[in-house]
Image (tube, rainbow, N blue to C red):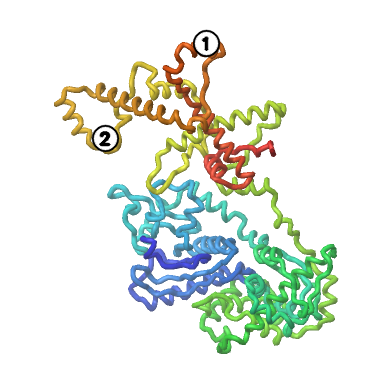
Amino acid sequence: MDALQRPSIPEDAVQYQLFLVHPDSSDAEAHERFLQQILQNILAEIAPLLVQYIWQHQPFSLRYHPEKGDVPAHLGGVTEFGDNVEDEWFIVYLLKHITRSFSDIAAVVYDNDGQFLLIEAAEQLPKWLDPDSSENRVFLYQGELHILPNRTRSGEVGWPRDSVPTVERALEVLHSHTESCLAKQPIRAALAKRLDGYPDKIQQNFHHAHCYVPAGIAVVLSRRPDLIAPAVSAFYLRDPVDLQACRTFHTFPPDTRVMTSVKFTRCLCAQLQQQNFVPDRRSGFTLPVHSHPQYRAHELGMKLAHGFEILCSKSGQSSSEKEASVSSNPLWRGFLDNLKKNGYFKGELEGSVRYKDLMSSAESFFRQSVTSTHCPAIQNPGQEMLKVLEDTSYSLEDLKNQEAHLPPEDSDAWLDISPQELERLLEERGGRGVSDGTRKTAPDEEVQEEEAGYSLIAVTQGMKNFINAMSSHEGAEIPRSCLAEPFSFDPDAVTSALDGLLGSKDDELDSDDFEDDDEEDDNDVDEDEEVQNGEPREQAGAEALDNLRKYMDEMDQELQSTNIGRSFTQNNRTSNTADASESSLADAGSELVEEEIQPLDVDLNLVSNLLESLASQAGLAGPASNLLQSLGIHIPPDADQS
């Protein structure tokens, strides 16, 4: 599908659709009721994973979409994940979980980049599969990635790559030929590697930190931990107008501060920590010295207080009707029954404190994922904070007594990453393993010489492979041999090829090597002309080769009078004796004989120019290092700091 015809998706958002693989479209109303029932079952299935999850901007939400054009009725939604890309991949895990639990459901997911699942497995995709040929071909079905194969002959399973199947036809092929549509193992392995660790990874992405916050914030976060995300965003995206409300804290006064444990996501914690901020003197917030053991807790609490105060100051700016209770929604009773059936309340007695907390989380999840159909984000977080404060009674003294029983905070070592760790992560993301280290057995000097020799040969050979690789109009492609196959060098084959190219042997190259694409297309016409003129093909090829050499010689003579030749390193193969004899004959007429043009050492010039470019990058990213990295070539850091 043309990029202009694709539905517009926000830059940091993911869209997902759930289809029935064999729908019954004869009765639209019955089909809608069936999808609504599936929606209740799906939400009850994934609720234990979602009620405690903290979304960066918008939560995962599903609603019924009627049939429109060639897209059948389905369940779907859009989630803006902002700066936290892990939200997007968590949604992919949810879709795999849903399609595994509900075998008659197939899921489609994409973002503004298109089929990002295929981007993750780009190195393993077949050549025919590209953004233009992947439309309506990629599905998550029965917990696995499925791709409709390319049908090249009639009778084969799949769909021709030059046409786009409708969603309904694609689902028919997927349902009737599930095994044939299953993606190849390397493609599925790349996706499984990206999702490795879920659902345990949900807890690993949380970060618990001690924060010195006003008592009201501690109470709000104890009842609604998900409100931490809009508060951090409010501080992170603040403007001077927002900070006017923080000159005097009316809702969360600083003299009520207590120490509490706050649950962040790693993304939210990093956003809060990495911003430098000095509070207004009139706000009443003061920070201890940097050496104070609780400086970090005071700083985080101060920033959080500003975010909460900004949201509460905006709570009255938008007039909205009073929110209806979730119990009035006809879907709530079925959703609650499914939760009880799946053991969501964990045997807690109805009316107990833990039961009420679980019920509050379930209501919040239902309100965001079901009833808020147009904008699943929290509509007015400031108003919800004030509502929690109105409905909850607390004692400042009790909160201070709880400070002695706080759980230990998590280590924030994940915020700091060494250059070696960064290099390892980049290599893993690039599909290449870490160097296996042949450095342990040989002496240091021999190892360095061996590495240097291997690296220089690998540089020249890798560049030759890259130049000789055939690429299409879509751009240059890295030869797969540069990424996977070990380096090998055949000097006899290289010598033979150079001799044939330079004409040092009696046999000449065939004239086909010098014909362009247009001449190759007109082979029949050329053969007729050769027969009429009585000229054999070999003679024409020799004449073309002679003309090429004359052209190159004339170009060398013109360039010899310029300074261009001095920028290259020449291959001086003459011995000292030959140099002496040449100097003795110089007086006999050197002005009448042109200076012999020495051949260039192409490999030496290539390596020297690349190393000079790397040195000018001063260890930073640049064209030379990026090109070598893409070829799988790793140059050691420059030891000469001068």
Q: In this rendering, is residue 415 above or below 82?
A: above
SS at mark 2 in the image: helix
> Where in the figure is residue 49, as x and y percent of width and height?
61, 67
Q: In this rendering, is residue 336 above or below 488?
A: below
Left or right of 73 on screen, residue 155: left
Q: Residues under labels 2 and 1: Cα distance?
A: 52 Å
> Where in the figure is residue 390, as x and y percent of width and height?
70, 87
Q: Amino acid at mark 2?
A: Glu
Label 1 crowd bin: few (<14), some (14–19), many (20+), radius 10 Å: few
Q: Nearer the viewer, residue 147 or 288?
A: 288
- Tell me if label 2 and label 1 are in contact, CB under 8 Å: no
Residue under circle 1?
A: 584
Left or right of 401 on screen, residue 556: left
Q: Amino acid at mark 1?
A: Ser
Q: Nearer the viewer, residue 252 or 17?
A: 252
Which mark is first along the chain, 1 or 2? 2
Which image quarter: residue 31? bottom left
